Amino acid sequence: MVSRISELVLNCSAPELLAGFWSGVLGYVELGREDGAIEIGPADAGFGGLQPTIILSPSSNPPTGRLPLHVDVNPVDRDQGAELERLLALGARPADVGQTGGEQWHVLADPEGNEFCLLRRRLDPCPDAGG
């Protein structure tokens, strides 16, 4: 037996704002609310599905400095340039972590400054074998 990731929890000062942002980025929907936290995930799978859900948990102590973990996202229905434009329109902003300019990915930050990368390779929109 092994374990797998079922949820990612992001402590944040504005769960509503980040739930909207990440739902827009990933095509997720709100799955539930509890004690100020908002859980988002795939509409057709929800908790326990192949993709982990994300819990935006309210915190008055946001982290300072770079987080030791970041998210990578890949476009599924457009090229990287078009996806970059879409993410910027949703509220992402470019982030400088010391890139040289020759990278094949874009480093971005969500509305609270959490860094994530937009990778170049287009992925199948459905990660399971069932299509």
Image (cartoon, grey):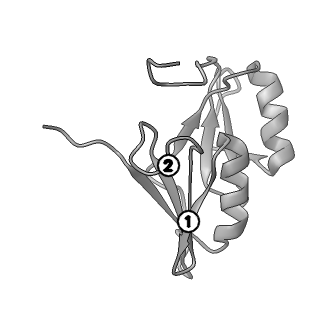
Q: In this image, 107 relative to 44: left or right?
A: right
Q: In this image, 130 relative to 24: left or right?
A: left
Q: In this image, 115 relative to 82: left or right?
A: left
Q: Secondary structure at mark 2?
A: loop
Q: Position of residue 123 (x, y in %)?
A: 59, 19
Q: Secondary structure at mark 1?
A: strand
Q: Nearer the viewer, residue 53 or 66?
A: 53
Q: Residues within 10 Å of mark 2 (few under 14, many from 20)?
A: many
User: Can residue 98 be seen by looking at this rendering?
Assistant: no
Name the image quarter holding residue 104.
Answer: top right
Q: Residue at x 68, y 41 (%)?
A: 27
Q: Nearer the viewer, residue 34 or 11?
A: 34
Q: Nearer the viewer, residue 17 or 42?
A: 42
Q: Residue at x 51, y 54 (%)?
A: 54
Q: Amino acid at mark 2?
A: Gly
Q: Quadrant of the N terminus?
A: top left
**Spatial separation of the CA atoms under disc 1 and disc 2:** 10 Å
Q: Residue at x 53, y 79 (%)?
A: 61
Q: Amino acid at mark 1?
A: Gly
The residue at which mark 2 appears reads as 46
Q: Position of residue 41 (x, y in %)?
A: 55, 49
The residue at which mark 1 appears reads as 32
Q: Residue at x 72, y 54 (%)?
A: 21
Q: Position of residue 64 (x, y in %)?
A: 54, 68
Q: Position of residue 67 (x, y in %)?
A: 49, 55
Which of pointers 1 and 2 lies earlier in the amino acid sequence?
1
Tally of numbered discs:
2
Q: Residue furthest left?
A: 1
29 above or below 103? below
Instruction: Determine which of the numbered discs, if any, sits on residue 89 in the image.
Output: none
